[in-house]
Amino acid sequence: MASTDQSPTLEILVRTPEELSIWTGPPFANGQPGVKLEKVSCVNAKFSDDGSRLMVTKSNSVISIYDCKSAKEIRSFEVPNVTSAILSPCGTFLQTFQKPSAPQEKNVTLWKTENGDPVYQHSQKNLTKTTWPAIQFSSNEATACRMATNEVQFFDTRDFSKGIIDRLRVPGVSAIELSSAPGSHVAAYVPESKGIPAGVQIFPCGNASQSQAVARRSFFRCSTTQLKWNHGSTGLLVLVQSDVDKTNQSYYGESKLFYLTIDGKHEGLVPLSKEGPVHDAQWSYSGLEFAVVYGFMPAKATLFDKKCNPLLELGTGPYNTIRWNPKGKFLCLAGFGNLPGDMVFWDYADKKQLAATKAEWSVTSEWSPDGRYFMTATTAPRLQVDNGIKIFHYNGSLYFTKMFDKLFQADWKPEPADKFGDITELIKSLNLGKVEDKKPSGPGPKSAQASNKLSSTNPPAQKPAAYRPPHAKNAAAVQAELLGIGESSPAGSMSKNALRNKKKREKQKEKKAASDANS
């Protein structure tokens, strides 16, 4: 286990309309981030999954690869008409998709980042979420495969010149997901056709041409599906969504969540205790449990173990997002997008809520690799105003805020969680007090101590005043100015017109009193 003194420095990629920068920290010296890489002109940027390489698209034809340790450019590729590009998990390969100019043109290219040579090419008509990246890698790049017509094709990642080394026959396949750690299995989705139900099957990758499905599940009414492997490649969550809800309970259609395991023990629905859509389902970094936010608003959140048994109820609220802490122990339950931005921080290991706060209009959100910070960002083009970054401590207290005229991207640089120390030692270094002292007052409201912790950075909002129509807002001031109302107020606070009117009235009173006396 790495000590906190030897832990890597946290870094954040920040991209505005014209350029990107890489910040160092948190923690920030003097409250402001340092800058490791400054003002690189670009239109897109993305880290490799292990954080060793940074891909920067500088124009529609130039892609540069940076070494993240030195922040120096190590390779540049000129790829005409490139519309999408992505690095392999360890940064060994760059995959590009070019807009095809002729039928059967080999427009998908796999490049070796070390020497810039193309190692494999094939043709692909369309670019969609289910077909990109075209070649999927396991996290250690030991396994690679791609979906083709009615089959899954496998490659030797040490020598792509061998071409396709194995084929897995799956008639009608329209989406696949390779397990990443390790790359031992592949999940294949076949849509509904001619009365035959849709289905998901799991196959082992070794000797693929001879392999049989180790788990399968069929279902009707499916428009889209999401396949989510756990770390360890033992379980698969299948989120099935249809555009139409036949019960007419939801305008957004209906959704179901299935759980399949490679040993075939689980091939059924996840037991959700509230009706309504599945908003989010995420595995923990350990792969031993998963959390689901589901049901009509206020949505419900539940933690399950890998045997699909409920472990912990996180209550109900306006939530649609789950973010697991990479170091374990903590998680954040939030409501972003079209929800008001409520966030609840939990110590799920001790089964208690730490704090509740808000991050309105957030578009992206993620924990830092060391598990001590949680960053939210409001970005364009989703939102064109109030763009900015907020960084919170693990317990929900606000640490840093920075606003931008326009912000396109804010990402942590990935780092393996085991490069950092134990999470209990890491949070002690922040000197925020003991989390264990905070007792939840229920799944919904904040605890009193958590509210005190937040009050230093997030003062409670004042109760909104009663509505007054626009013409009435300045009525009192106008009356005082024109009619001299409010004579009891001190003269120093009255306008010139009010004082003039007051003197006129006093003179009129004196004249009237004198005329009455004479009569």
Image (spheres, rainbow, N blue to C red):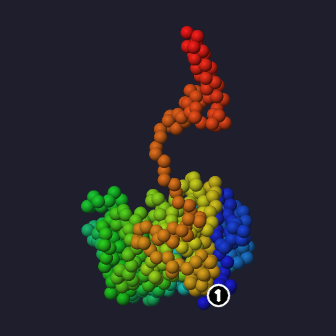
Which residue is labeled 1 in the image? 3
The image shows residue 255, relative to residue 212, as above or below, that is: above
Residue 253, image quadrant: bottom left
The image shows residue 408, relative to residue 431, as above or below, that is: above
Amino acid type at mark 1: Ser
Nearest the camera: 492 or 470?
492
Instruction: Write the residue at 27% across / 61% down.
Output: 246
Residue 217, image quadrant: bottom left
The reply to whether residue 192 is visible in this rendering is no
Position in image of residue 364 (x %, y %): 53, 65
Position in image of residue 387 (x %, y %): 59, 57
Residue 78, image quadrant: bottom right
Instruction: Write the residue at 49% across / 74% down.
Output: 354
Nearest the camera: 442 or 241?
442
The reply to whether residue 470 is visible in this rendering is yes
Instruction: Write the residue at 56% across / 84% down.
Output: 424
- Which image quarter holds the C terminus? top right
Answer left or right for 481 relative to 352: right
Instruction: Write the residue at 33% across / 87% down.
Output: 265
